[in-house]
């Protein structure tokens, strides 16, 4: 990772985060690993909630040897009820300063578990269900909950019909799941919960890896190389996620990168689209969210 990013963190994070604890979901991915690295640099202790235990162990050894913070690893999977419940039981009595959800899936085949489509489960329903359970516990009253969303939320309308079939256009289906994550998180914030949203902008994530087969082959030949020249690497994108632990945010604000279309650059506070804030007063949308996460 480039030294200039650590200099940015050192210059912009004046609060003392040493010995704070972060429960980090998704800490082995590109932005997730960068996020874990920055937090370790700030001397934040980590609980890495992951599916890939071997990769997490490598990251733990690398970071603790360099930054000497405490890192714990627990098995975690939003699509496995048993594993999810075990993870909850392991942390429910702990003092957690930051709950950071950087998990997400995209361009999956349409599949249902207990009547819920899996992209919605991972990106929206299960995170909100877990936050709901934790936020009721006394020792989580001071926790800052952080959900990672996507600027793609702007390109779809909020869902109101629980029986509506997912869009055949997988990018739109992903965007809708992230829009509902935004709305449900803002519902919590409106009720007084310390919850913040962040997005990484557009970066060279695994979304654009041709192994995912998410786009036509011509996209990977012509567009991806150009995107790698224009857009951010994951280490820079992760700075906008990290910024969510540092500042206070109003109901209509979240953390994201500066630059063209707010998708490139160093972090700043950004305003949500007025339509998504307006949706918070739509009883059909609120009812849909409540039905999905109950």
Image: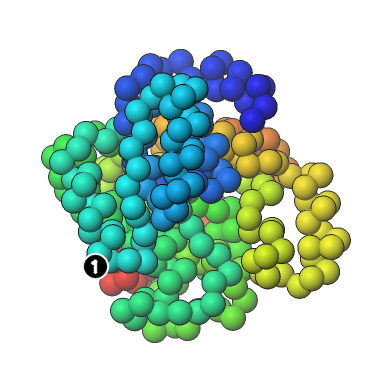
Compared across the picture, whether 49 is left or right of 149 comes to left
- The answer to whether residue 158 is above or below residue 274 is below
Can you say which quadrant of the picture contains the C terminus? bottom left
Is residue 132 in view? no
Measuring from the top left, give residue 40's x and y in whole percent.
45, 27
Q: Position of residue 145 (x, y in %)?
A: 34, 42
Q: Which residue is mark 1?
A: 294
- Residue shown at 23%/59% (left/top)? 85
- The N terminus lies in quadrant: top right
How many labels were placed on the picture? Answer: 1
Q: Residues within 10 Å of mark 1 (few under 14, many from 20)?
A: few
Say if 38 sits above or below 80 in the image: above
The x and y percentages for residue 9 are: 55, 22
Considering depth in this image, is 127 or 92 the residue closer to the camera? 92
The percent coordinates of residue 212 (x first, y second) are 64, 66
**Residue 64 drawn above or below residue 23:** above
Q: Is residue 192 visible?
A: yes
Q: Is residue 21 left or right of residue 137?
A: right
- Tag 1, which secondary structure? loop
Q: Residue at x 43, y 27 (%)?
A: 64
Name the quadrant containing residue 268.
top right
Report the residue at 62% width, 46% height from top: 201
Q: Observer-nearest residue: 209 or 257?
A: 209
- Residue 181's image quarter? bottom left
Residue 34 left/right relative to 77? right
Check the image and tell me how it is coloured: rainbow
Q: Can you tell which quarter of the image residue 266 is in? A: top right
Which residue sits at x=54%, y=77%?
Answer: 109
């Amino acid at each position: 990772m480039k030294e200039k990013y650590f200099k940015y963190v050192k210059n912009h994070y004046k609060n003392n985060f040493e010995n704070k604890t972060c429960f980090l979901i998704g800490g082995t991915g590109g932005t997730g690993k960068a996020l874990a690295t920055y937090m370790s640099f700030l001397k934040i202790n980590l609980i890495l909630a992951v599916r890939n235990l071997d990769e997490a162990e490598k990251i733990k050894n690398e970071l603790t040897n360099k930054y000497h913070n405490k890192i714990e690893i627990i098995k975690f999977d939003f699509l496995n009820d048993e594993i999810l419940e075990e993870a909850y039981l392991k942390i429910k009595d702990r003092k957690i300063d930051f709950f950071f959800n950087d998990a997400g899936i995209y361009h999956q085949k349409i599949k249902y578990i207990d009547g819920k489509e899996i992209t919605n489960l991972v990106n929206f329903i299960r995170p909100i269900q877990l936050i709901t359970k934790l936020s009721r516990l006394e020792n989580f009253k001071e926790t800052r909950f952080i959900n990672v969303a996507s600027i793609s939320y702007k390109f779809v309308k909020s869902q109101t019909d629980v029986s509506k079939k997912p869009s055949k256009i997988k990018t739109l289906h992903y965007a809708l799941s992230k829009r509902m994550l935004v709305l449900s998180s803002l519902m919590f914030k409106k009720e007084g919960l310390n919850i913040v949203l962040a997005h990484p902008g557009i970066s060279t994530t695994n979304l654009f890896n041709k192994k995912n087969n998410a786009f036509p082959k011509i996209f990977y030949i012509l567009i991806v190389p150009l995107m790698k020249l224009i857009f951010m690497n994951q280490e820079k994108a992760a700075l906008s996620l990290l910024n969510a632990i540092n500042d206070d945010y109003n109901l209509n604000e979240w953390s994201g990168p500066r630059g063209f279309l707010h998708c490139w650059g160093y972090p700043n506070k950004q305003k949500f689209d007025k339509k998504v804030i307006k949706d918070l007063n739509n009883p059909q949308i609120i009812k849909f969210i409540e039905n999905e996460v109950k």
